[in-house]
Amino acid sequence: MSKSKKYLVMLALALGQGAVYFLPYIRNVYYAPLVETLGVTNAQFGSLVSFFAIGCMILYIPGGIMSDKWNYKRNITISLYATAALVASFAFFMNFTYARVVFFLLALSTTFVFWSSTLKAVRMIGKSDEQGKTYGIFYAMQGILSIVVQSGILAVYNLFPDQAFGLRVVLLINAGINLAAGLACQFFLPSPEHLAQERGEGSGGGFQFKMVGQVLRNPLIWLIALLIFCAYGLYSNSYYFSSYLTEVKGLDFNFGAQLSLIRVTYMMCVASLIGGFIADKLKSTTRWYIICAAGAAASCVLFVTLSPTGVSPVVLGVISILPAAFMLMVYGLTSSLYEEYHIPMAVTGTAIGIVSIIGYTPDLLFGPILGGMLDRQGADGYLSIFIFFAALGVIGLLGSVLAMFLNKKRRKTSAPAEF
């Protein structure tokens, strides 16, 4: 595959990956107008998110298995078309009863086979010695597209004084983007057989259900889950830094909001790209993870140490960018570990499904845990949260050191042959 076609395919996958999760996470931008349009309480809207999250947790593992059993190109395109249909239908039937149905079905269309199939496709597109760069570029593309597309959609929404009508237009635009991404993947994404041939591998049809047990018994799979848990848990909750700086340290709210955008949205583009190239230069994502986890932990400790000393909130704001930046330089690259740890291509989807059910539990666990710290300790709870973040960095560091040791040990024995 030519380099230009490779980037075109990755662009289509990145567009789809960003588009399918728009409605499940619509609360990030359109929370208030959607609650008002649906005529629901905050708790009722929260139940919609729970329907989606529970559905995802149930479907991660069976979806991963099926993404290995079925053609990933078909999985991706059908999922995008199904999401387009669900979002478009919701645009015309915006009521709480139908919303519950849609949010649960979105778990099927966005998580069941789409998630694992997309990450597996990206793995197959990249060469074995360019996995870090490949995933880094993929996540950078996703970040850039999200900024451009979501900014455009928000501008369109602001054109309409009627909130309900504006939301309907926004949803129809998103449905159109899902449809366009599906068509792009259908026409440009090479077949699994074609990509396997380019990589000099089998067609990927060697998956057997007995291999699921072998994946489950592989300790490196569980360590990948731990590394994602630490990286995702830290960066996805880094908005607590802005809350602390504005509520406790008196930082201007708008400046705090800009820091949040830089910390997650913009850093997703920049950090993923930089991290991918560095990981490939080091010839090991695990080595790079060790460095970044240490950097994240150290910067959290630095923030906590300087906070009581009267240091300018602006300086603290700059330091607060570092923990998320370090973790974002490895979060997207964790998918390259399947190649580094010699996980067979035939079970990549299964491995991703198993890893995801552990790696993304911060979405379910951290809200109550971190919120409880604030409820019990007040403003001091923020510093406890940042110490908790530092602990995540240390755990990630130790986990990556152990993974490196086990991988070296397995390579000296018979790691790939076990499958």
Image (cartoon, rainbow, N blue to C red):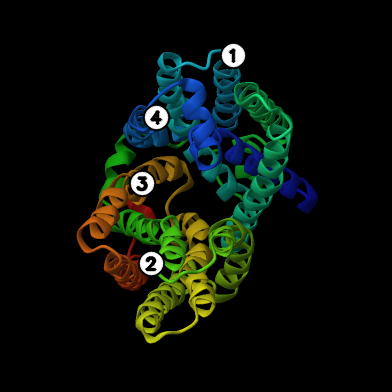
Residue at the image position 36 percent from the left and 29 percent from the top: 55
Q: Residue 13: name its quadrant.
A: top right
Q: Nearer the viewer, residue 285 or 412?
A: 285
Res 26 seen here: no
Q: Is residue 194 left or right of residue 115?
A: right
Mark-to-mark CA distance, 1 and 4: 18 Å
- The circle on residue 363 is 3
Q: Residue 72: name its quadrant.
A: top right
Q: Earlier in the sequence, mark 2 or mark 1?
A: 1
Q: Secondary structure at mark 3?
A: helix
Q: Amino acid at mark 3?
A: Asp
Q: Amino acid at mark 2?
A: Arg
Q: Earlier in the sequence, mark 2 or mark 3?
A: 3
Q: Which residue is mark 1?
A: 92
So how many labels did they put on this image?
Answer: 4
Q: Which residue is mark 2?
A: 411
